[in-house]
Image (cartoon, grey):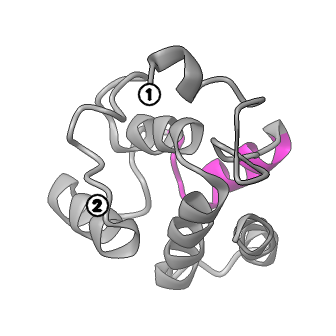
Amino acid sequence: MSYNMAYNKSVMLEGRPLVANLSYSEKRNLEVFLEMQSGYVLSFTNRTFEEFVFDSTRRRIYDGAYSGFGSSKANHLRCFWEQEADHVVGKLLKDLVECSQLESPLRAKCREIADRLL
């Protein structure tokens, strides 16, 4: 698949968008809940983040395909959102929300976002 096709939200696969359909406000809520403002994702190290993403989705977050926005964990996750299909992003988000120890009003919103994508 070409780079341009990966970013074209009008491309469909079996009637579903080829990339995750996240609104700006949904991304913002996810970023706040997952503590992505400083480039991190929750309390993951690079190694534990890579293992978590692979266990959840069978995707290698550091294989180069998700480095288009920069080298931080948060940037890899943002790129993942832009390249993967709804159900793959939904699965990872659901697992991240469940893994999180954070008690936040955003927890329920993030769970709803993940469920919508699945």
Q: Quadrant of the C terminus?
A: bottom right
Range of residues picked out in magenta: 25-37
Q: Residue at x 55, y 15 (%)?
A: 4
Q: Residue 17 magenta-drawn?
A: no
* SS class, disc 2: helix
- Compared with 34, 98 (above or below) is below
Q: Residue at x 79, y 50 (%)?
A: 26
Q: Looking at numbered disc 2 in the image, what kind of residue is underneath it?
A: Phe
Q: Nearer the viewer, residue 82 or 78?
A: 82
Q: Which residue is mark 2?
A: 49
Q: Nearer the viewer, residue 50 or 40?
A: 50
Q: Residue at x 42, y 54 (%)?
A: 41
User: Magenta part mainly helix, strand or loop?
Assistant: helix
Q: Looking at numbered disc 1 in the image, what kind of residue is underneath it?
A: Met
Q: Residue at x 30, y 75 (%)?
A: 55
Q: Residue 34 magenta-drawn?
A: yes
Q: Residues within 10 Å of mark 2 (few under 14, many from 20)?
A: many
Q: Nearer the viewer, residue 80 or 108?
A: 80
Measured as percent of width and height from the top left, residue 107 is found at 72, 75
Q: Which residue is mark 1?
A: 1
Quarter-wise, where is residue 7 in the image?
top right
* SS class, disc 1: loop
